[in-house]
Amino acid sequence: MGRRRWSADDRARILEETLTPGAVVSAVARRHGLTPQQLFTWRREARKRLEAEAPPAFVPAVVVAPEPIAAKELKPRAKRRAPRRRVVAIELEASGVTVRIGDGASPATIAAVIGALKGAS
């Protein structure tokens, strides 16, 4: 017996069965004469196709002005400088995780962080 070929419509129908609440992939696979591994591979391929077709998602950005330093907080300068406190320049929130990127971050670092967040979601 040769390899069985599934049409795109058949695959879509079988994949839809696996996405119904309470569906068990092994049972759906058995019902259609497939292995669970085949169905998981089909699901992964379908997810990759959807991700490739989907436009990039953007989240709203909120710009907050830095708080002014009160006159009483100013101290005379000592000979030795205290380490400079970094100010957060970018704050990203995705899937309940907040990432703060400092003002000295390079564009490549920012792009890598955003890429990692996109890959994790």
Image (cartoon, rainbow, N blue to C red):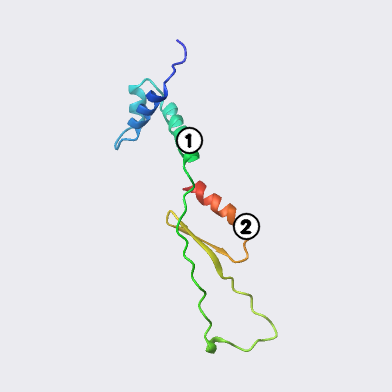
Tell me the SS state at disc 2. helix
Callout 2 environment at 10 Å: few (<14), some (14 to 19), or many (20+)?
few
Q: Position of residue 61 (x, y in %)?
A: 47, 61
Q: Residue furthest right?
A: 79
**Looking at numbered disc 2 in the image, what kind of residue is underneath it?**
Pro
Residue 35, quarter of picture: top left
**Looking at numbered disc 1 in the image, what kind of residue is underneath it?**
Arg
Residue at image position (47%, 53%) is: 58
Q: Position of residue 17 (x, y in %)?
A: 33, 30
Residue at image position (52%, 74%) is: 66
Residue 11, quarter of picture: top left
Q: Residue furthest top?
A: 1
Give me the disc on residue 102. Answer: none
Callout 1 environment at 10 Å: few (<14), some (14 to 19), or many (20+)?
few
Give me the disc on residue 107. Answer: 2
Q: Mark 2 or 1 closer to N-term?
A: 1
Q: Position of residue 89 (x, y in %)?
A: 55, 66
- 110 up-or-down from 72: above or below: above
* Closer-to-camera residue (53/10): 53
**Residues at marks 2 and 1 touching, judged by CB atoms closer than 8 Å:** no
Residue with the mark numbered 1:
49
Question: In the visual, does 8 lie left or right of 87?
Answer: left
Residue at image position (62%, 62%) is: 105
